[in-house]
Amino acid sequence: MKLMGIMLGPAALLFLLFMPPASAHTAIKATLPRDGAVLQESPPVVEIEFAHAARLTSVVVSGEDKSERRLEFTPAGSAITFKIPEPGLTPGRNEIRWKALADDGHVINGSLTIIVKPDAAGTE
Ligand SMILES: [Cu+2]
C-alpha cells in the first residue's frame, strides 16, 4: 500500500490587518444627569461631555411610547461639552441617542437613559 503523502504547503502567513487605533476618535467622558439617572422630573438641561472635541450632529429622544423627538442642542460647532436645554423628558424611561463627528472624521454615536419617575406630579 502506497502512502500518497499530501504535503501541505507551509501554512499561509497571516498578516495582521492594519487597524486604526481606537483612541483616534473620542468618546463620552460624562453626562449630566448620568446614564441611568432616576429623576423626579425632566431636568432643565442635559449635558454631554466628550473626552475630545467633537461636533454633535443629532440628538433624539424616545420615551415610553417609542416615538422619536429631535432635541435642540448648543453649540452647533465643535466642542467638548454640549447642552440640551429643556429636553422635555416624559415619565418613564427616556432614551437619548446622539450622533457626532469626531475631529478625526469618524462618526460616533451613543445613548444615555434617563428615567423620570412615573408618579412625578405635574405631568400631562
Ligand atoms: Cu476615530
Image (tube, rainbow, N blue to C red):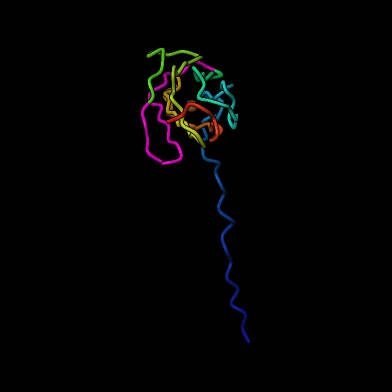
Q: Residue at x 51, y 31 (%)?
A: 20
Residue 119, picture quadrant: top right
Above-or-below relation of 54 to 1? above
Counting labels gives 0
x and y percentages locating residue 117 in the rendered image:
56, 33
Instruction: Give the position of the N terminus as an image quadrant.
Output: bottom right
Q: Which image quarter: residue 49?
A: top right
Tell me what residue is drawn at x 48 percent, y 26 percent: 122
Q: Nearer the viewer, residue 109 or 74?
A: 74
Front-most of 42 and 47? 42
Q: Position of residue 23 (x, y in %)?
A: 56, 26
Residue 57 or residue 107, whichever sits in front? 57
| Residue 57 is covered by the magenta coloring | yes
Q: Quadrant of the C terminus?
A: top left
Which residue is situated farthest in the front direction here?
121
Q: Start and end of the magenta stretch?
A: 52-70
- Picture coordinates of residue 15 (x, y %)? 54, 43
Instruction: Look at 52% across and 21% down and name the residue there.
Output: 43
Magenta stretch mostly in which secondary structure?
Answer: strand
Percent x, y of residue 47: 51, 18
**Residue farthest toward the bottom in the current orientation of the protein:** 1
Q: Is residue 12 above or below residue 61?
A: below
**Left or right of 66 in this view: 6:** right
Q: Residue at x 42, y 21 (%)?
A: 56
Residue 67 located within the stretch drawn in magenta: yes
